[in-house]
Amino acid sequence: MLSSSSSMSFQDTVRALEWCEQGLRVLDQRRLPSAVEYQTFGSVRGVAEAISSMRVRGAPAIGIAAAYGVVLAARQRYRENPDTWKETIEADLAELAGSRPTAVNLFWALDRMRSEIRAIDGNPEPRLLQTARIIHDEDIAANRKMGELGASVLVGANGVLTHCNTGSLATGGYGTALGVVRSAYRQGVTRIFATETRPWLQGARLTVWELEQDGIPATLVADSAAAYLMKTGAIQWIAVGADRIAANGDTANKIGTYALAVAARHHGVKFMVVAPTSTIDWRTETGASIKIEEREQRELLNDYFLRPDSVITAWNPVFDVTPAELIDCIVTERGVVWNPDRQAMMALADAR
Ligand SMILES: CSC[C@H]1O[C@H](OP(=O)(O)O)[C@H](O)[C@@H]1O
C-alpha cells in the first residue's frame, strides 16, 4: 500500500514504465491486480509487442513506450551501421506504428522522435533518450495540471464516475481522468465510482487497484449499472480519458464511453473528457475518420465457443466515438474547452 496521506504526490503513484540501461521496464498490466510483475524489453520488437499485447496500455503510456522503443531501435541500428542507421530505423518506426491503431499519442511520439532523428549527427542514443525522457516528464506535468483544472470544474460535486483506466498505469504518472479524480478527492469529491469496463476490465482490475494503492475509497459498478446509477442521482459528473480527439472535439475512447455519454445527457449528468493536447489529432476533422481497433474474439467469447465448429462469433471493437455535442468540457494541460466544437477547439491550437 502506498502512502494514503492527502499529501501523496504523484511520485507515490505506481509507475507503468521506467527506463533502465537494459531497456524499457514495463509493469505487465495483464497480470494486475493479482500480480505486480515487471518485464524489461531490450529491443524495439519487444516494446512493440508489449504495446500490442497490452502489457502496456493507455494512450499516453503507449506514446511514451514507443518513444523509448525508438531509443532501443537507434541503439541497435547505429551499432549495426553508423552510416545507414537513419534509413534502417524506419522499419522499426513502422513496427511501432503498427502496434495499435487508435491512440494518436503513439503516432505523435513517433513523429516527435523522427524529427529528432533527422537532426542528429553521430551516436543517436543520448539525444533520443533525452527526448523520450522529456516526453515522459511532460506527460506527468500535464497530468498534474489537468488534475488541478479538472478538480476545479468538479467543485461542488460529490459523485463522479470514471470509465476504463486513465491513471498512472495509462500514462507517464498520476493520470488524466483518474488524475482529476485524485485531485478532486483531496478537495472533497468523495463518492467515486468506476465501471468494470468489459471485456478487458481496466476498471475492475486496474482503476480500483490504483485507487486502493492511494487509499482512496471507490465503488465498482458493472458497465450495465451505470445508467441506473445516474438515475439515482449519485453522480453529477462522468470523467473519462481519450485515445484520439478530432479537430471538432469528437472523442475516441474505450468502448462504452459513447453509451455513458448518451445516458449522461438523458439524466443531466455532466460529461468531461481529460486528455493532454498530444491526444488531439488536428489532421482528423471529425470522429467519423478515426480508426477503431477491433481485438480478438477470444477476448469476449467464452472458451467453449472457440471451437472450430461453433457458429458463434464475437464483435470486439475496443473503442467508440463520442460526438462533441455530448461532451460538456474537454480538460487539457493548456486549459478547459467548454461545449467543444471546431471553433472552440481552436483555442488549444493557438496555444501550440
Ligand atoms: C489516459 S487515457 C487511456 C485510455 O486508453 C484506454 O484504452 P486501452 O486500455 O485499450 O489502451 C482507454 O481508452 C483510456 O481512456
Image (cartoon, grey):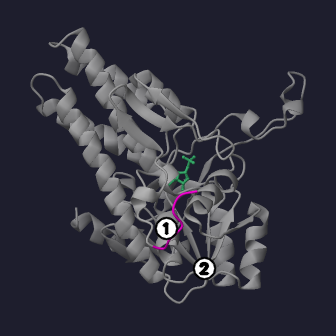
Element at badge 1? strand
Q: In the picture, which quadrant includes the N terminus?
A: bottom right
Q: Residues within 10 Å of mark 1 (few under 14, many from 20)?
A: many
- Distance Cα–Cα, label 1 vs label 2: 20 Å
Residue 70 colored in magenta in the image: no
Query: How many labels were placed on the picture?
Result: 2
- Which of the numbered marks, if any, corresponds to residue 221? none
Q: Position of residue 25 (x, y in %)?
A: 44, 34
Q: Amino acid at mark 1?
A: Val
- Residue 283: tell me if it is visible: yes
**Cβ of mark 1 under 8 A from ligand 1:** no
Q: Which residue is mark 2?
A: 190
Judged left or right of residue 154, residue 226 is: right
- 247 vs 209, nearest the viewer: 209
Residue 4 colored in magenta in the image: yes
> Where are the magenta residues, as a range?
1-6
Relative to 316, residue 39 above or below: above
Q: Which residue is mark 1?
A: 273
Residue that appears at 65% across and 45% down: 317
Earlier in the chain: of badge 1 and badge 2, it is 2
Element at badge 2? loop
Q: Position of residue 289 (x, y in %)?
A: 48, 50
Instruction: Name the main secondary structure of what is drawn in magenta.
Output: loop
Q: Residues within 10 Å of mark 2 (few under 14, many from 20)?
A: some
Relative to 20, residue 108 above or below: below
